[in-house]
Image (cartoon, helix red, strand yellow):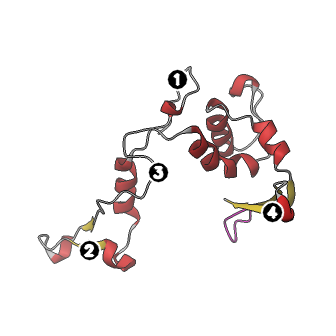
Amino acid sequence: KFDVDSTDRVPGNFVRDNSYLKERAVLDFSKKAGSQVKEDADQPAESSEIVVETDNSDPYPFPNGSSPDIPFIVNALSCGVLCSKCVLGEGGGREGALGNPTELSILRAAYFSGIDIDKQKENAPIVAEVPFSSEYKFMATVHDTGLPNDELLCYVK
């Protein structure tokens, strides 16, 4: 979750919240998902409910209910920043902003997290792009990272 009312740019503006993801999992999983989803044996067959089995091990880099550190946020938002051609409004606001509302919200999250969007785009310029298509439902950009061996970085969203 992102605290949209915060006036400070601190990692605490983001909080990991598994409850939303668990609700989505119940809605999105199908019975074909194998061992992750099973029918609730206590329910009658005509109204069987999908139950999501939870794993108590935590593969995430920070625990539920806590906030990630800045490097994690920068990495998580890099794809949205580098794949975007949107322009934020003055001070990260809506006035003067140009672009898709979803992409603008990603840029706003990056901006209010203290990420220098222009510098990030300058440090990893686009060298190739696969534009979004409704047929295959993704877009990709390839970036020159300036790393040794002319390594390129590809982001897909």
Task: Report if residue 105 lies within the magenta region.
Answer: no
Residue type marked 2:
Lys
Q: Nearest to the eye among marks 1 and 3: give it.
A: 3
Residue type marked 1:
Ser
What residue appears at the point 31 percent right and 77 percent down from the top-left corner?
35
The CA distance from mark 4 to mark 1 is 36 Å
Residue holding disc 1 = 6
What residue appears at the point 34 percent right and 76 percent down from the top-left corner?
31
The CA distance from mark 1 to mark 3 is 24 Å
Which mark, residue 61? 3
Cβ atoms at labels 2 and 4 below 8 Å apart: no
The CA distance from mark 3 to mark 4 is 25 Å
Q: Residues within 10 Å of mark 4 (few under 14, many from 20)?
A: some
Secondary structure category for the residue under label 2: strand
Residue holding disc 2 = 38
- Please report whichever mark, 1 or 2, sits nearer to the chain's N-terminal start: 1
Residue holding disc 4 = 152
Residue sitting farthest toward the top = 7
Question: How far across and how far down the image is residue 90, in percent?
Answer: 75, 23
- Please report whichever mark, 4 or 1, sits nearer to the chain's N-terminal start: 1
Residue type marked 3:
Pro
- Please report whichever mark, 2 or 4, sits nearer to the chain's N-terminal start: 2
Most frequent secondary structure within the magenta stretch: loop
